[in-house]
Image (spheres, helix red, strand yellow):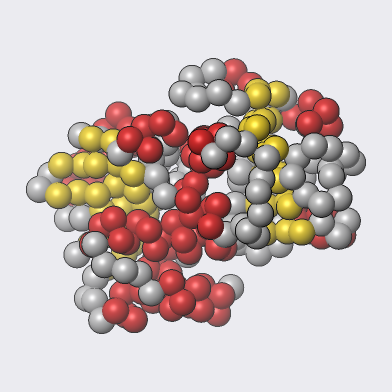
Amino acid sequence: MNFAVIGHPISHSLSPVMHHANFKSLGLDYSYIALDIHPNHFHHIRDIMAEREIDGFNVTIPFKTAIIDYLDEVDDLALKMGAVNTVKIVDGKWTGYNTDATGFIESLPPKEYSHVLLIGAGGASRAIAQGFAAKGADVTVANRSPERLADWPFEVHKITLDDIERFADRADLLINTTPVGMTGFEDEVLYDFKSVHPDAVVADIIYTPSMTPFLKLADRLELTTVNGLGMFINQGAQSFEIWTGLEADRTAMTECVKNYL
């Protein structure tokens, strides 16, 4: 079977490394590649996948919402989130799923998160926000342009980055879901933690580098930090299970990525 991850840019992705470690551990002769798809060419996505005989693929920035228009069916949970990160292809039928929210929530320290503040309004943010909203949490999303939140299919508090101070002191979980801090985007921090609650958990969905400027600043303030590695492993494992019906070797996946990093 052949699998892939699509995005733009995509050279930073360790998905091929992680999935091949899982394939090797399970004795499977499968392939997994990273495909950089320029947004101008995205409308050819079905032809691109057919040409490469792809059986399933992951979707990352900036295509998690755009991919929905090319699917034959969308899982109910992904439909509620308005974002897809996993596509399964069977006999030419494309079905979309989302493993971001469950993958992220599983990576957190086990506690109740009542007030969640997310920075960014991309596909991962939509998924994670909906995941917490479904659990009854009070969810606030800060973005440079709150208008980008207008079509979200569920309710959240919508604020600008300038308004974070008014919400940060009651947040027990603060999450960066933007590419800021990722390799190639290291020169900016979107929040200075002036008002954050001392018991808050600070998370970043980025896993490379393992300590983004966002997390380094939180760590200096002795806040509990979580990077995106756990989410990355969990969502990847769940994607594999959707594609194949087999249980992924998460230990092999984690060890391989950690060694690589």
**Residue 218, image x, y percentages:** 81, 54
Q: Is residue 29 left or right of residue 155?
A: left
Image coordinates for residue 203, horizontal then vertical, percent: 68, 52
Q: Residue at x 53, y 57 (%)?
A: 106
Determine the image quadrant of residue 207: bottom right
* Position of the C terminus by quadrant: bottom right
Answer with the quarter of the image where residue 230 lies.
Answer: bottom right
Judged left or right of residue 190, residue 260 is left
Quadrant housing the N terminus: bottom left
In the picture shown, does residue 130 fall above or below 100?
above
Disc tally is 0
Q: Is residue 23 left or right of residue 80?
A: left
Residue appearing at x 65%, y 24% in the figure: 157
Left or right of 258, for residue 55: left
Res. 6 in view: no
Residue at the left extreme, as displayed: 91
In this view of the protein, can residue 235 be seen by the observer?
Answer: yes
Where is residue 137? Give x, y as percent: 62, 36
Which residue is nearer to you in this view: 136 or 230?
A: 136
Residue at the spot 20% in from the left edge and 55% down from the top edge: 55
Indicate the position of residue 253 as horizontal and vertical percent values: 44, 73
Q: Nearer the viewer, residue 44 or 145?
A: 145
- In this orientation, which residue lies closer to the viewer: 5 or 112? 112
Viewer-nearest residue: 9 or 152: 152
Q: Residue placed at 84% from the left, 32% from the top? A: 165
